[in-house]
Image: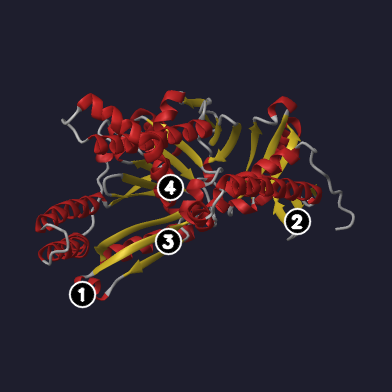
Amino acid sequence: MDNLKWQRVSSWSLVYFIVHFAFRFVKDGVFNLLPIMVVFVTQVENKWFWGQVALAVAIISLLIYSFFYYINFRFCITDEHEILLNKGVFKKERLTLNFLRVQNVNIAEPFYFKPLGLVNCIFDAAGSTSQEAVLPGVTSLYAEQMRERVLAYKETQQQTAAKQQPEDTHTNEPQQCLVLSNKEVAKFGLMSNMAILALAALAPFMNVVLEFLEKAVINRLESFYQQEVGVLVDAAALAVFSILVLVVLVAVLLSVLMSLIRFYNFQLYFQAGKFKRIAGLLERHQLSVSLDKVQSLLIKQNLIARLLKRYTVQCLQATSGGFSAGAKSKQSLVMPVLSLEQVKQVCQWVHPWLNLTSDDFKALNFKGVEKALLIKNLCFYALLPSALIAFMGYAGQGYSPLYGLLCAVLLSSLAYLSYRRYGYYFYQYQGRYYAVFRSGMISVHYRVFELYKVQSTRAVSTYFMRKSGLKSLSIQLAAGTATMPYIKAEQADEIIDFILCQAESDQRSWM
C-alpha cells in the first residue's frame, strides 16, 4: 500500500465539499434539531441576536470541517482495477471499490464548476449511496476517460459470460430519444408529495407562524374584508382561510420549483440496451444505466397524476437500502411525468412484450386476491373505527353519531379500492418469464420484473388464513419487495416453486 500513487483533487473541489455538507446538514441535521429549534422559537428572548450567533457558528464550523475534509481527501486508481478513497476528519475511512462492482459511472456538472470546465465523476456501486465513490472537481476529459476505462474492463471480464447469453437484440437499434418540456416537468411538482412534506416540516412552528401572520397580515385582511363584504361573511374566518390558501400555494410552488431544479431540460436516450439521462438546473446530472442492471420497472399514478393523465416511471437498480433508498437515490433512473404514449415507448425499450392499449393496463389479465382480505380490512380498518366514533358521539364526546356512519362509508370505500387494486400477472416472452404486481388504493402502482432476478421468496399465513387455505406472498428483489396478500395457498406454493426454479436454473447475471 505504501507504493500506491495517491492523488489530490482540484482545490476547487473545496466548493463541492462545502455545498455537499451544507446540503446534508439541511437534509438530515435540521430535522434532528427540530426540538431545539422549537424551544428556541418559543422560549428564547432576543431571537434575532442569538439566531445570528448560531448561524455564524454553523457557517464557520462548516467551512473548517470542509477544509480539513478536503485536506484528508485522497484517491488512487490501482493496477488491480480498484478505486481507493481516503477521506474523513474525525473518523478516517478508506473506501475500496472494484471496477467490476461499479454499476454506472455518472458525470455531474454543478453550476459552480461549469465556468471552470470541471465535473464530478461518480462511481455508483450496488449499495447505499453513502458507499458510492465521488471524485469532485476533475476535468470532463478525465471523467470520460475513467468511464471508458471502467466500462472497457467490465466488458472484457464479462465476455465469457456474455457468450453464454442470448444474442443482444438491441445492438443494431438506432438511438431513441425522449424529451420532456419544462412545462411537463412542472406538473411533477403537482404530482409529488413534496408540498405535503414542506407543510409537515412547518407544523412545529405553525403556532409561531400564525401568531406572526395574525399581527402582520390577518388583522389587516380582516379589516379589508370587513369594509368590502360587511356582514355578508365572517371577515375573521375569511382572512384565516385566505392565509391558509396562501400557505398551501407557496408549498405547491416550492414543490414545482424543486421539480424544475432536479429535472430541468429532461433528456432520455436509449441505445444498445443502455439508458442515458441528462437533467438538472443547478447541476446537469448525467446518468447512465444498463438495461441488465434494472431490477424492476415501477409505474405509478396517484390521484393528481390521474387528473393530469400522467405517470411516473422508475427503473430501480440494486441497493442495500431497499425500495425507498433506491427510489430516492440520485442514481435511480426516474422519468417523472410521462403520458400514456411515452409510457408505452419506455415499456417497449425495457419489456417489449408489455403491449399497453389505450385503456392503460386493463389489457393485462390480472388475477385478484381473495375476498377474505376485503372482509378483514372492512372489520379492522372500517367498522371498528366507525363504531368507536359512533360510541364517542353517543357518550357526548363532541362527536355526532352521524360521523360514525360517514366514517364507515369512507373507510369501507377505501378498503374496497385497496382490495380491487391488488392483482398479479405472469407472462412468457421468448423463453423469459415476467411478472406484474399491481397495488394501491386511490393511486395505483405497477411493478414489472423478470423472475430470474428474484433474490428470495416468502409465504406468510396466520392461524385464520391457514384455516381458509390462504397465504400472503412476498417476493424479495434487489430493489425492494413485491407483495401479494391473501391468495390461495396452492397458488402461492406454485408461484414460489416456479420463481425459485427460474432463479436457480437461469445462469444470467442478475445485475
Q: Secondary structure at mark 1?
A: helix
Q: Which residue is mark 4?
A: 208
Is disc 2 placed on a helix, strand or loop? Answer: loop
Q: Point out the frontmost of discs 3 and 2.
A: 2
State the CA–CA distance, disc 1 to disc 3: 28 Å
Could you tell me the amino acid type at mark 1?
Lys
Three-letter amino acid code at the position of disc 3: Cys
From the viewer's perspective, is the residue at label 3 or at label 4 nearer? 4
Decide: few, some or many residues near mark 1? Use Cα within 10 Å; few <14, some 14-19, many ≥20: few
Residue at mark 1 to residue at mark 4: CA–CA distance: 55 Å
Q: Amino acid at mark 4?
A: Val
- Dot placed on the residue nearer the N-terminal end, 3 or 2: 2
Looking at the image, can residue 158 be seen?
Answer: no
Quarter of the picture holding the N terminus: bottom right
Q: Is residue 380 above or below residue 174?
A: below
SS class of the residue under badge 3?
helix
Residue 87 in percent (x, y) is at 75, 53
Give the residue at mark 1.
467
Image coordinates for residue 72, horizontal then vertical, percent: 80, 51
